[in-house]
Structures are given as C-alpha cells and as structure tokens.
Image: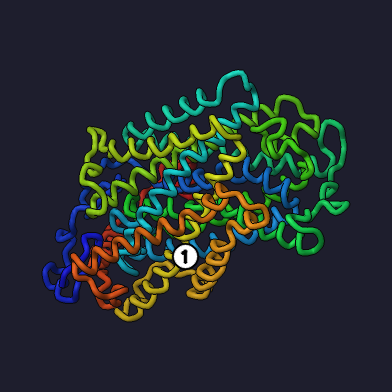
Amino acid sequence: MQRSPSSSILRSPSDYKEKPTQSVEFLEEGYGEVCSQESPFKEHELKKGLKNRHVQLIALGGAIGTGLFLGSGQVLYQTGPAPLWISYLVMSVVVWFVMNMLAEMAAFLPVPGTGSQQFINDFTDPSLGFALGYNYWYGFSILVATEIVAAAMLIQYWTTDVHIAVWISILLAMMLILNLLPVQFYGEAEFFFASIKIFAITGLIILGIVLMFGGGPTGDRLGFRHWTGGNAFHQHLVPGSTGRFLATWTAIVRAGYSFIMSPELIVACSGEVVRPRRIIPRCANQFIYRLAFFYIIGSLVIGIIADSRSTRLMGEKNASASPFVVGIQNAGIPVLNHIINAVILTSAASAGNSFFYAGSRTLYSLAKRGLAPRLFTRVNRFGVPIYCVFVVFAVGCLAYLNVSSSSSQVFQWFSNITTISGYISWITAAFAYTRWRKAIAFQGLEDRVPYKTRFQPYGAYFVIGFVSLITLTNGYAVFFDFHIGDFLAAYITLPIVFGLYVGHRIYSYFWVGRKRWLNPYEEFDFSKLEAVEEEERNYVNPIPKNAWEKVVFKIF
C-alpha cells in the first residue's frame, strides 16, 4: 500500500509485525525539546530544555495576551458590557471542550512530535493534515504580527513622538533573538513574563472589585452604573432588539481571538515533559479553569470600571489605552495606569514570543514529515531550527502594515485572519477526536485511556456545529457596509485552507495512489502505547526536601 509522506503514524495491520511492542527500543527517533532525561524516545536534533512549569505557564501566558487587555476595549465600545461578559462565558465553554479533547488524545499517546496538527493528520486524512498543518503555521505566524502591532500601540500611550515603525523593529528584533537562543532561555523568559501577567490580572480583578464598592480615591461607588440607561446592550448595526442580539453575536465572534490556538500550546509539549500522562491532564485542568476565571471575571470587571461609551476605547485619543487603563484613570488613581500599561505591554510581547516559538516548531514539524522543504529541518548548535525562525520572522514583518494604516484597522485585520484560522483548526480537531474515540473502541483500548472527560463525544459535536456557525458568520457585519479589505480579512483563510487540501488531495490521488478519503480505524497506529505505559510505570516520583518544594510540587 502506498502512503503519503505525511502519514506520520499510520500503518497497515501487517506493519505491526515488524517490531515487537514489548520493547521500547524499537521506537523511532522523536522530535522536540524532550525534557525527560529518562524517556525512551530519543531526541533528534532539537535540544532538551522545557520543563513542566514552563509548559503550564507558556500555555496560560500565551492565552492571556492582548485579547482581554486591549482587544476587549473595541468590543466593549461596539457591543456593551453585557455582550462582552456573555461572549467570554460562551467561549470559555467552547475552549473547555477543545482543551479536553486535545488533552485526552495527547495523554493517551504522548510521543515526541504530538500535537493537534498530527492528530488531524493521523486520525482523518493526510491531505486534511497537510492543509491544517499550514493553517496552524500561518495562524501562529500572523499572531506574531498581531501581538507586535498591539504592543506598539501600547507604547504609543506614553509618546507618539517616535515613529511606530521603530517600536515594531525593536519588538521584532527582541523576539528573533529570544527564539535563536537555546530553548531553556525561551522557557525561563516565558515563565517569568507569564507569572507577571497572572499576578497583574489577579490584581486588576481585585482592584475592579474594590472600585465597584467605592474603594477608590474619590470614594465613588461604581456598582453597575455603566450597565444602566440602556448601556448594558448596545444596539449594533440595526436598532431595537435585533441590534442588541447582533451586539451579543458580534461579541462572541470577536471573543474567540482571545482564546485562539491557546489549547494547542499544551498538547504541543506533550512529548516534551516528564510523565506526560499525569502532567497533561493536570495542565489541561489548571489551564482551562484559570483561563475561565481570568476571562469571565476579568471581562465583568472591565464592564464595571470602564464606560462603554468612551471614545478612548476605539483609539481616537489614546490609541494604546486598554479598558483597564481607561477605568483606572477615570477612578482618579495616579501612576497606576502607567504601571498597568507596562504590564500589558509585557503581556503582548510575551504572547507574541510564544506564538513565534509555536510557529517555528510547526514549520519544523512539517519539514520533518516531508511537507515543507528539507532546508527547514536544519538547526543551529543550540538545537534551534534557524530557518524556520527566520521565516516566521519574515511573516511577523507584516506588522509594518501599521505604518501606513491606522493601528485599530490593522489590528482588526490581523485578529480576524487569525481568529478564522483558529476556528477552522478547532472544527477539524473535534472531527479528529470523534474518529479517535471510534478507533479506540474498534481496537478495544477503552480501558487504557488514562484521561477521560465529561460530556463527550457530545462536546465535540457541539464544537463542530457551534464553531462552524461562528466561522461562517465571522464577517457578517461587512455586508451592512461592504469593504473589500474587511471581507478578505474575514474569509480569506477559507479558500486558502480549501486550496491546500485540494492540491494535496490531487497529488495523493494521482502520484501517491491514495484513493480513500479517510484513514480506516484499523490502521490507526497505537503500537507505541506499551512503551508509553512502561515509561509511566518506571517513573519515580521526586521526593520534596523541604516545605517550599512541597508547595512547588503541588502547584506544578
């Protein structure tokens, strides 16, 4: 049987006879910065470096970026505080299902190179895997430009005397340097910056509650003042109740940007940590509950402290001011707004750096499977895929579009492009999950699945249906006032992904001889399962030496 080069773990039933599953020595060399020194999977070219604590905060830190700190300001102005809060509540449920699905698959067979892209490739069809692999790379790379634009906007809060191209250049150079250094430097930097973001958002939530009850310098009790007088739900695009419904739907569509491609950061590290079958479920649970807390409570606080009618939220006076900063200024608190703006700037740069890393590793993985030029498999002496880093850097230079357009418009274009890209990835990942579950049942492996989540597979069906609806209506507002640029930003990703799929499908059909549309359940290769289980059995739990280590081991 001929196979596409992208069939990374698929084999025919006869292939299982080639190598005994009782031993771990047959395993092929893996990819990734594998952290376990005792793992049976050998490292291949990339260097070890990431640790468990890195994985948790890289994923959480990558998620807490400009979506809540900055992008939520425009949504608040357009739709009102109630739709903003509802949107984050709804999207938190969606992301909960997505994270659970990816964590189940990753914890079951956490081999080097595991990730959402590989799940789609192996559990659906190589052509779909090819299209979504490049969709992931494209999305991660564009997110770099998005976060750089947001960071440059934040710097302009302090001064507009320096041209914004200077700040874009400095930010790009910093990200390039960090991603050319050994991966442990990247991991430590992200751990540090993510910790700042977590402490900052926690402090902002506490501050918002204090201001709500009149604890500010003026003693003014805000309560839900900004929700009264018809301000809770704005009338968006059309008047009346229809306009209020469209405001809520617009907020839901836009809220996706805050969460997009964040769950994938955890599963991408599943083959790179010690004892992944224990760590991945734990990281997944902590990630989604922390993220839901920060976004649901954080969006509520935004609607309380910031006036949704303030034109500053749209950047007409202070292009880089977030709703947090606007609310703090309105409360009469001096200096703190500058500190918070600096924290948000750190957040934007950190999130961009996380996506920079993910984009370069996604392109490296594609090259290792023969889906990208072999040049991109080369690494420097630190084990960094330098050519992949340079390509992501080149895409990040799209941030310079901000030089000739308004910051708000460019930020909107980028967020639309990356959001639709992430939505498509979630839909296909959910489809891959439903087929993975059926293959597990078909091969009689249900009792060997270490992590099972609730409401499945109905959660997967919900994600497929609901996110498909969001994807199709992502740019509906453009039809009320048509602009070709907004239309392309909203929908250009759909024909790109479809074109990649059709092109690879034609290649597979005529040159590889692959006639079937989906991979059969009996050919899903779980032969590495015994090796993974043996590694788990042989793992020796570290013993804490003092009270501090007990706390650290409990958290991480």
**Kind of residue at disc 1:** Ile
Give the side of residue 316 with respect to residue 93, left or right: right
Residue occupying image coordinates x 61% and y 53%: 255
Count the numbered circles shown: 1
Q: From where the camera sits, is residue 293 visible? A: no
Quadrant position of the N terminus in the picture: bottom left
Horizontal and vertical percent position of residue 118:
33, 60
| Corner quadrant of residue 173 | top left
- Looking at the rendered structure, the secondary structure element under dot 1 is helix
Farthest left residue? Answer: 18
Horizontal and vertical percent position of residue 438:
37, 78
Q: Is residue 345 above or below residue 139?
A: above
Q: Which residue is mark 1?
A: 427
Q: From where the camera sits, is residue 417 visible? A: yes
Residue occupying image coordinates x 35% and y 65%: 108
Horizontal and vertical percent position of residue 269:
37, 51
Residue occupying image coordinates x 18% and y 61%: 24
Residue occupying image coordinates x 49% and y 62%: 98
Horizontal and vertical percent position of residue 167:
52, 25
